[in-house]
Image (tube, rainbow, N blue to C red):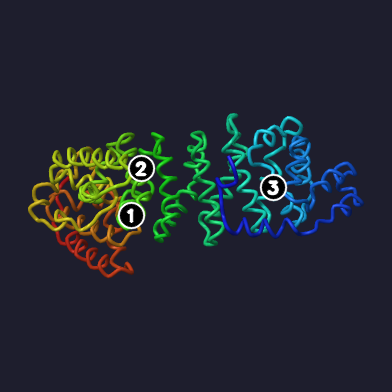
Amino acid sequence: MSLSLVSNAYLDDASAKIRSKPVPWEGYQRADLITSEELALIKKVDKQPRQRIDQILLSDLQTYALLYFRLLKKLQRVDTMQCLLVLIADALSERIPVFLRTSEADPDLPFLPLLRALDTQDEFVQLKASQILTILISSDSTPLALQHLKPFLATLSGLVQGTAVNKRDVAVQCVESLLARRDCRQAVWGVTGILAGLIEILKHKPGPQMSYQVAFCFWLLSFEQNVAEQLDKKYDVIPLLIDVAQGAVKEKVTRVIVATFRNLVVKAPAANLPAMLVAKLLPFVKNLSTRKWQDEDILEDIQFLRDELNTNFQSLTTYDEYTSELSSGYLSWSPVHESDDFWKENAAKLNDNDCQQLQTLLRLLKESTDPLVLAVAAQDVGQYVRHCDRGKKLVEKYNGKARVMELMTHEDSEVRYRALVSVQQLVSQPWAAV
């Protein structure tokens, strides 16, 4: 495994400049910050050609692995930390196990000095330390130490959610690489900021490579049962991934998204098929099946999705479609919302199972921030009250009336209008005994 696991042009250019910068090693020795033995060792490799350094490391790698990390642990000046991180990164290459074994001499090594470097305000130090940490964690075959991973993931969370291009690029690559380890997936899943940051990146329509890397993160996460069950419910990721795939210009972006959908169906069909149908994945998959693909595996995944979605679509009644839309949390102006016939026939069904579907509808009305969802939900509340004798009192019981009235002052004009119509139904309908 090499540095190419996390590659970034800014890191490469900055590293080249740092290699030629002087570091006051003798001054550190005079100040008793490093020993004369450490000075002699570091001077052997300081500002030497890469070929000469490789020759020295070949005969004394363990000594230098310990030296680099011990110096990073005790020297805090930014330019010195930059130099040491470059020396470590240059030395890693195929020698990663030796650097991991530095823990045998000092339990703080190799991770603690790198984790401390993450707190530095210098961008290069923070990103170079992230690159090295990712390589070491990804290569370590021993059980994962959460005390090392958690602070690193906290840093990555901030970087992924930030707007600085280099920080976000490096952070996404780090997350992608860490997720290749199964024991990292649950830890990443537990960091809301990382998931929210990845979602926001996709919403802003990044380039093909970033779209692929973020989608790849979701694909790796989707292998975990609990993630597959909750991913769309928590982050509304299915319609977003469909949108990304529809706009993709690179086959690899579509391929990884289709593979993610397959995992979600295999692992948690009940949690994901309704949302996929509501988000119109079936017609999109039918369209994908007519295209020519270089990768034959994608055809198998497309056919699998088409068969599963078709089977579920054919078994759905109109009311099933409506409840699927409710459970997805992604309401849109499908015909049922404005169909008097649908509401005459089905309004009372929202009261089944202790008003489960009514409570879902009202929860969307209270929790959603999407103006489209709010407008459709307000419309549905009005239709429900109009066509269900007990509707007005039940909406009042579950605190829906106050929320609809609040929405009459919403910033979106369509939400205001639908809320007004719904309130008219709530205040004009006669009360029915419950």
Considering every residue shown, the one lying at the far right of the view is 30
- Residue at 19% x, 39% y is 312
Residue 316 - label: none
**Sequence order check, earlier mark of 3 and 1:** 3
Q: Give the amino acid type for the residue marked by disc 1 in the picture.
A: Lys
Distance CA(mark 2)–CA(mark 1) = 30 Å
- Residue at 84% across / 43% down in the picture? 41
Q: Which mark is residue 366?
A: 1
Q: Secondary structure at mark 1?
A: helix
Which image quadrant is residue 114 in?
top right
- Check disc 3 and give the amino acid type: Arg
Asked if labels 1 and 3 touch by Cβ distance under 8 angstroms, the answer is no
In the picture, the quarter occupied by the N terminus is top right
Earlier in the chain: of badge 2 and badge 1, it is 2
Q: Which mark is residue 116?
A: 3
Q: Nearer the viewer, mark 2 or mark 3?
A: 2
Give how far across and how far down residue 90 sits, in percent: 68, 47
Q: Does dot 2 land on a helix, a strand or a loop?
A: helix
| Circle 3 residues within 10 Å: few <14, some 14–19, many ≥20 | some
Q: Secondary structure at mark 3?
A: helix
Q: Dot 1: within a 10 Å radius of its alpha carbon, few (fewer than 14), some, or many (20 or more) residues?
A: some
